[in-house]
Amino acid sequence: MFFRKNNKPAGPVDFLIAGLGNPGRKYEGTRHNIGFAVIEALSARLSAPVKKIRFQSLCGEARIEDKRVLLMMPQTYMNNSGIAVREAMRFYKLAPEQLLVVCDEVALPAGAVRIRRSGSDGGQKGMASILYHLQSDQFPRIRIGVGAKPHPDYELADWVLSKFSPNEAKVMVEAVDNASAAVVTLVGEGIERAMNLYSK
């Protein structure tokens, strides 16, 4: 195992793991909230409740190997995710490379997982907000495919706020599990190892 359970963290935060989504029941289970789903999976995997309200987010602390991590679900709504992330990073004096963002990606088929060291926002509004507020793209990110909109005329906002079909939902359960395992591997063993195992 690459994580420890029931071991109270001590010392400064080494990694901020931000899963993106929208707060509120009406957004639960939507394509845009897959980042929240990964944080919830990590919460269970690491025995780290994500319930504390800090930095305009729901937060929880855990350890992955010798690193203390802060799990974060910004409650600012997707388009303002960068406000919450910047607040936490300033508080802990973290460099961009100590941030890991998990979010949805419409350009990937449902269930695909992509890990990158850096890059553009790719049209993802939460990622765009983080890039703007940090003034840097030099942080790793895990993108989870949620499928392309079914027709060119379909509004993108409506698509990402829609829920998965029953068949897609089965695929996404595995994707969330893979993405949460990828987070643990990336923090504990490095991005190359995570990319080799989980980036498909």
Image (cartoon, rainbow, N blue to C red):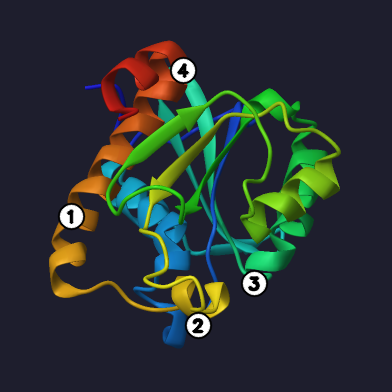
Please identify, in this view, whether the residue under mark 4 or under mark 2 is nearer the observer: 4
Q: CA distance from mark 1 to mark 3?
A: 25 Å
Instruction: Indicate the amino acid at tag 2.
Output: Gly
Direction from residue 62 to residue 173 in the image, left or right: left
Direction from residue 162 to residue 154 in the image, left or right: right
Q: Nearer the viewer, residue 175 or 55?
A: 175
Residue 125 can be seen in this image: yes
Question: Element at badge 3?
Answer: loop
Q: Which residue is drawn at the image coordinates 26% and 47% (left, top)?
A: 175
Tags 3 and 4 touching, CB below 8 Å: no
Q: CA distance from mark 2 to mark 3?
A: 9 Å
> Which residue has dot 3 on it?
77
> Which residue has dot 1 on it?
171
Image quadrant in which the C terminus is located: top left
Displayed quadrant of residue 26: bottom left
Please identify, in this view, whether the residue under mark 2 or under mark 1 is nearer the observer: 1
Q: Nearer the viewer, residue 8 or 154?
A: 154
Q: Which residue is drawn at the image coordinates 66% and 31% (left, top)?
A: 119
Q: Earlier in the sequence, mark 4 or mark 1?
A: 1
Residue 65 can be seen in this image: no
Question: Element at badge 4?
Answer: helix
Q: Which residue is drawn at the image coordinates 82% and 41% (left, top)?
A: 134
Displayed quadrant of residue 159: bottom left
Instruction: Indicate the amino acid at tag 4.
Output: Ile
Q: CA distance from mark 4 to mark 1?
A: 24 Å
In the picture, the disc for residue 191 is 4
Q: CA distance from mark 4 to mark 2?
A: 32 Å
> Which residue has dot 2 on it?
24
